[in-house]
Image (cartoon, rainbow, N blue to C red):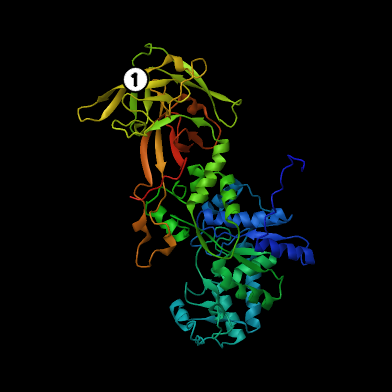
Amino acid sequence: MAEETNAPVAEPARKLNFLEEIIEADLASGKYKSILTRFPPEPNGYLHLGHAKSLCINFGLAMKYGGKTNLRYDDTNPTKEDVEYVDAIKEDIHWLGFQWEKELYASDYFDQLYEWAEMMIQRGQAYVDDQSLEEIRAGRGTISEPGKDSPYRNRSVEENLRLFREMRDGKYADGEKVLRAKIDMAHPNMMFRDPILYRIKHASHHRTGDKWCIYPMYDYTHGQCDSIENITHSICTMEFDVHRPLYDWFIETLGIFPSHQYEFARLNLTYTLMSKRKLLELVEKGYVSGWDDPRMPTLCGVRRRGYTPEAIKAFCEQIGVTKRDQLMDIGGLESCVRTDLNARANRYMAVTGDPIRIILTNWEKGRTEWFEAPLNPAFPDGPKRRIPFTGELLIDRADFMEDAPKKYFRLKPDGEVRLKYTYIVRCNKVIKDQDGKVTALECTYDPDTHPQSGQWRSVKGTIHWVSAEHARKFECRLYDRLFTEADMGGIPEDRDYKEFLNPESLVVTDGWAEPALMDDNSGIAVQFERVGYFVKDPDSTDGHLIMNKTVGLKDSFKLA
């Protein structure tokens, strides 16, 4: 007979994703001694959950393989960028637990990019075009038809240099001229049909002020910035795969460090939008209270809602790295939030909305009994909180039913439940107002069912409660999903995405909690037992507590 053993069974190693395979091959071949990645946000809005995936990949790969990651702002459009966004991006990255090697800006390289543009003009690889943007778009052709050469395509090197320098010196108005690369107007990849390198924008830049009135385009800027920094693996989302050949063309044409771009599938979540433009519209038109509204998919929004960095990173690890776009169920993210908070969140009892009063008719008037309960049941010997129990209590209206079905195990007429941590009570009388609404229940408690010193008697139902006398009132903000449509990216173009805003995404109500909640300084969401996870809102004051719903104990989202 084989000898039994209690040795742990080793878990199978996780299969490498395609980016890890590339990096390991590059390191093994000696192509690179170490890797350097970058995270290149444009400072024109706040980071969202889609950026979180990119952050986890870029910083995560560098950390795994002993490399480093630069933070480089793609600040080439001064009319849409702001220092507010620069600072917010840094705050969000730190909140997720990442630290960059260098803080850099595309604007750091404006002089070098300009020199390369002049070099391309001198080589006959770029020209100044006087056409309007509409004319340029019309002349690009289609996938099946070649484009048409600009009438200004064959200007001399000398004329192009003069015009480009005059553009730089502010001689021309916005949109009057652009600088284009001279490649191939019949190229099958339309990105190569003489892409625009520079456009005129008379706007102050948040870092360079009024030094420049011409600004480089993304496709001309990004690869060269990677090259200047010696980025080994430039990792971005799949919508940029069509840009990669042009990225490589600029680097090869200029003869600079051969950074290379790799693409992965972006994060798409159900009931969520990741478009900065649409998120900005929601903010500016007042559909949400701001970028940090807890219904927003921004990192500052989910932080205010009580999501944790650990949960977000666990979700990104769970969904993996692939090249195929998928619509991920937001329930998966919410499950990661529950798992993380379940292990760490302090527990309290609270009732919300329209509670029902319990009157214990056999309780001694003025008497208060204090019960102890663990802050977290995972640590029964850990810190405790003290809960006051009196003759008048509040329970959730959902925990009482006058005409209850057979298998209803909460409170009902002539029925019994245990009040969590305390006694068994029986409902003897239902009190209603003149409209027939239940307002109170007269009950008796069984003194022999004290959980520590009484005789054990089992009942099937246990409900939560708070002492009416000791309860602390708070404002309860019940947040739910912002949209009613699961696939927001699949909405037809003739429909306005705002038609699908969920009218029940925020419900504000009152709540009453056990007094120990007021002393909670954990800094993370707490669990209201049997209800869900809630976090203190930063708008709270000493005299007015606001609690935001983070997530329920289970998915309860229902469409109207």
Give the residue at the far front of this rendering: 1
| Among the 4 quarters of the image, the one containing residue 412 | top left
**Residue 524 versus residue 12 in the image, above or below:** above
Residue occupying the point 20% across, 30% down: 435
Q: Nearer the viewer, residue 505 or 340?
A: 340
**Residue 66 versus residue 407 in the image, above or below:** below
- Left or right side of 436 for 356: right
Q: Nearer the viewer, residue 325 or 189?
A: 325
Residue occupying the point 43% across, 24% down: 419
Q: Report if residue 527 is visible in the image.
A: yes
| Among the 4 quarters of the image, the one containing residue 464 | top left
| Among the 4 quarters of the image, the one containing residue 448 | top left
Location of mark 1 (residue): 443
Q: x, y (%) of residue 53?
A: 58, 56
Q: x, y (%) of residue 280?
A: 44, 56
**Residue 137 versus residue 443 in the image, above or below:** below
